Amino acid sequence: MRIPGTCGPQMTLSILYIDSDYVLIDKPAGMLVHRSRIAQDQVFALQTLRDQIGQRVYPVHRLDRATSGVLAFGLSTQAAQRLADQFAARKTEKRYLAVVRGWVEIEGWIDHPVADQDASAIMQPAETRFHRLGQIELPHAVDRYPTSRYSLVCIEPVTGRRQQIRKHFKHISHHLIGDTTHGNGRHNRFFREHFGIRRLMLMAWRLRFNHPRSDELIEATAPFDADWQKVLHLFGCGAEGLKSC
């Protein structure tokens, strides 16, 4: 069952899928999944969704505050754990979209350990697959070159470390646009000033999994907000161009 909705002044979340076990939402960029000791936020996806549907929800996985897109919750601890086990066993299919600086290779594999928490944490194995959906060259000298190049990338995180995608693309010197922690400030500023884009251009675009109880294939795809519509127009990429992601 699909329920229309938008994130507006009342913070109504867009519900992409719901049944008796799971609810999948489109998390807006800038929203934390749940309360954190180190954040002063007053609005969170978990509490907002709980109040919206009138029952407790339990997060199955996580998305960074800055990342938008498909986020799954269980409607019981047992349901959440069953789907979380699928995530841990790599039996779900996750696809992200990102805009990065430079022209990435047509396809690639990043195998580079990252810290799962902070810089002092033990480095953990991490793997990310990607392939390029589009590339552009703009007549602006953002860096040391007379023009600036960017890629639209489809990303599959094989492992699920904290900020893995952002760290991996920094590692290969193709920083994500809008990443204020691991990105490139000059390119972030260029997108703010020329396109009005002030956010991380990373979204959890699609999630597929087999329902743990019925084995039915469940698929949810996040819609494109105004910033992403600008980007897709910039790359000349419509629905056909995303079929390979």
Image (cartoon, rainbow, N blue to C red):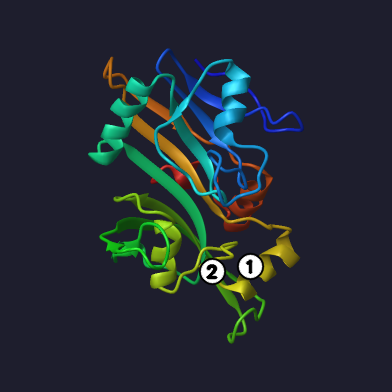
Please give left or right for residue 179 compared with residue 218 in the image: right
Secondary structure of residue under mark 2: loop
Residue 101 bears which disc, if any?
none
Mark 1–mark 2 Cα distance, whole angstroms, equals: 8 Å
Q: What's the residue type where badge 2 is placed? A: Gly
Asked whether 210 or 77 is in front, the reply is 77
Work out whether mark 1 precedes mark 2 in sequence or the reverse, and give the earlier one: 2
Residue 188 bears which disc, if any?
1
Q: Residue at x 30, y 64 (%)?
A: 122
In the rendered view, would you say 183 is above or below 29? below
Please give left or right for residue 240 compared with residue 164 in the image: right
In the rendered view, would you say 50 is above or below 67? above
Secondary structure of residue under mark 1: helix
Most extreme residue toward the left is: 89
Instruction: Count numbered badges in the picture.
Output: 2
Q: Residue at x 44, y 69 (%)?
A: 170
Please give left or right for residue 21 compared with residue 222 in the image: left
Q: Position of residue 178 (x, y in %)?
A: 60, 61
Residue 183 bears which disc, if any?
2
Q: What's the residue type where badge 1 is placed? A: Asn
Q: Residue at x 34, y 51 (%)?
A: 157
Q: Residue at x 32, y 28 (%)?
A: 81
Q: Position of residue 217 (x, y in %)?
A: 32, 23
Asked if the residue at tag 2 contacts the one at tag 1, i.e. Cβ–Cβ closer than 8 Å, the answer is yes
In the rendered view, would you say 47 is above or below 180? above
In the rendered view, would you say 194 is above or below 133? below
Q: Quadrant of residue 83?
A: top left
Most extreme residue toward the front is: 37
Most extreme residue toward the top is: 20
Q: Residues within 10 Å of mark 2 (few under 14, many from 20)?
A: many
Q: Residues within 10 Å of mark 1 (few under 14, many from 20)?
A: many
Asked whether 182 or 131 is in front, the reply is 182
